[in-house]
Amino acid sequence: MVGEDVRLSVRDLSISYANQPALSGVSLDVHEREIFGIIGPAGSGKTSFLRTLNRMEMLHENMTVDGSIVFDGHDISEIQNVYALRRRIGVVFPLPVGLPLSIYDNVALAPRLSGIKKKDALDEIVEQCLRRAALWDEVKDRLGALGSLLSGGQQQRLTIARALSQDPELLLLDEFSIAVDPVTTMRIEDVLKELKQEVTIILVTNLVQQARRLADRTAFFLSGELVEVGETEALFNGKVKDQRTLDYLEGRFG
Amino acid sequence: MTHSEGNGGVPGQSLIFAATPLNMRNHQLQWLFRVLFGLMTLILVVPVGIILGVLLVRGGPAISFEFLFSYPSDGMTAGGIWPALVGTMWLVAVSLIASVPVGVAAAIYLSEYAPDNWLTRGINLAIINLAGVPSIVHALFGVGAFVIFAGFGTSILAASLTLAVMTLPLVIVATRESLQAVPVAFREACWNMGATRWQTIRTVVLPNAISGILTGVILSVSRTAGETAPIMFTGAAFFFPFLPVSVFDQTMAMAMHLFVISTAVPGAPDELKYGTALTLITLVLLMNAASIWFRSYLRGKKKW
């Protein structure tokens, strides 16, 4: 069973782009060391939600955020040093982004940015993160090769290794399997189940079965609204508060 | 264009693939445009070929070690072009020192930091317009701003700064475009790791934009080397029988020298003019070739 400590608490969160609302009135809690799934059709505000969690809205013009997000006891809108906040939150995007640096430098980038310079400390972080992302065995002999030229599935695991190199307390995954083959997807899913022991994970996914496989609890977003949050198994077993959730889970939608 | 309608004549399967009148017309049009565009390309290439050919034939014999490395003599009707060659190098070097840091910094600001509002849109428009200002206008601006107001007199410094102002838009536009060719996803990945904008620019954006930036710089070099008007009133001398020793000296320059011996020196032999023109154009072509080579070299190491 997951810990009940609240790691992230969101209250009345509303997001809009140039006065076009993308998300309104969302309140939810994410617990310590759980995988929190977010499902919902395209345009339901899932990605916008993730963006606000590490204050990326600052870098998107026209994006305004209302409501409160409390991470680890701090209201993130009051954090002056957003860089420190972002370092504690790892992000994985839908399309793999291997930076045009060597595999080693991809993973060593975040530690370097936070001031780690010693070669052996970096070596250790790189190896550990690549191992945790199940990529080490495939790349250990060519750490100097370009990360951006790996295959899609490898790049996505590289991205996860990079996110882990920040030693994050919260890991945000935005439809990570969209450009990855099923076998790699399964490998990454295994990685995530392992990681759950140490890290809180928010998993946005278009695949409801993926949410079922991984998430302890799942939230259903629809047209910028949080329809409901519940224990994943309960939701899939039909114990829903809202008929729309059941329709979506069973593919009877629209 | 006459042929059978869809349901006439040939029976069976072949009918499906029979050309309709529309197919025929599209085919003819496609042929017409192909020939038209090909001709235009030819028209474009012919003058370049003729210029190079004539220069090679008539100027080629003039080129010698002696010609390149000696001073003009006999009232510029004989001798070489050494001071002009050196002067052009001075002008190019000093104007690069002025234009590259300013242009690259401005482009980084516009591409990476500036918000998209009416002010930055205005600045971008101004830069594009600056590129369209005739060089003689730049020359007069240079006289006013650098020769008179700043008190540099007619000197390499004033001429180079005038050239720098003229080539700034080239540097800015080339830099901005190569910065914007770096995918936004790379920046976002960096920002999400807690990198500042400058850390992101330094580690990910600039290393991947450097080939485009250098290409822009080299193109601006060839423009700088070839311009006459901007240096005519600001620092280039008609005849200056010494090599410049500081940026406050006047100097001869290739483009200016060619202009002078072609228009103002009676009795200058044609081969001198052709030789000078050939040297100048070779210089410019070599720089362009270097930029093309460099760009394809870096593309060979393409990173994504």
Image: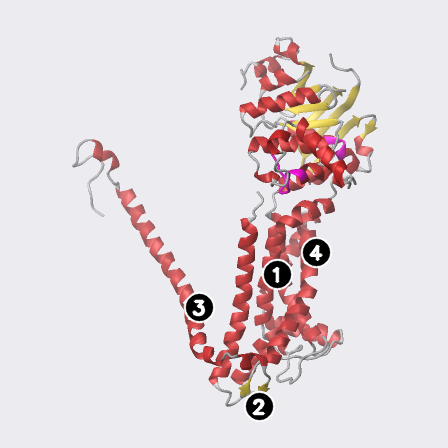
Mark 4 or mark 1, which is nearer the start of the sequence?
A: 4
Q: Are marks 3 and 2 on the same chain?
A: yes
Disc 4 residue type?
Answer: Ala
Query: Where does residue B246 sit, x and y in percent of width and height?
Result: 72, 76
Q: Is residue A91 magenta?
A: yes
Outermost residue on the front side: it is: A141
Disc 2 residue type?
Answer: Gly
Mark 2 or mark 3, which is nearer the start of the sequence?
A: 3
Q: Which residue is mark 2?
A: B75
Mark 4, secondary structure of its residue: helix
Q: Chain of mark 1?
A: B
Mark 4 or mark 2, which is nearer the start of the sequence?
A: 2
Q: Chain of mark 2?
A: B
Please tell me whether residue B44 is drawn above or below residue A179 in the rendered image. Answer: below
Q: Are marks 2 and 1 on the same chain?
A: yes
Q: Which residue is mark 4?
A: B105
Mark 1, secondary structure of its residue: helix
Q: Chain of mark 4?
A: B
Mark 1 or mark 2, which is nearer the start of the sequence?
A: 2
Q: Which residue range is magenta in the image?
A: A86-104
Residue at the image point whose x is 34% and y is 56% from the top: B35
Q: Chain of mark 3?
A: B
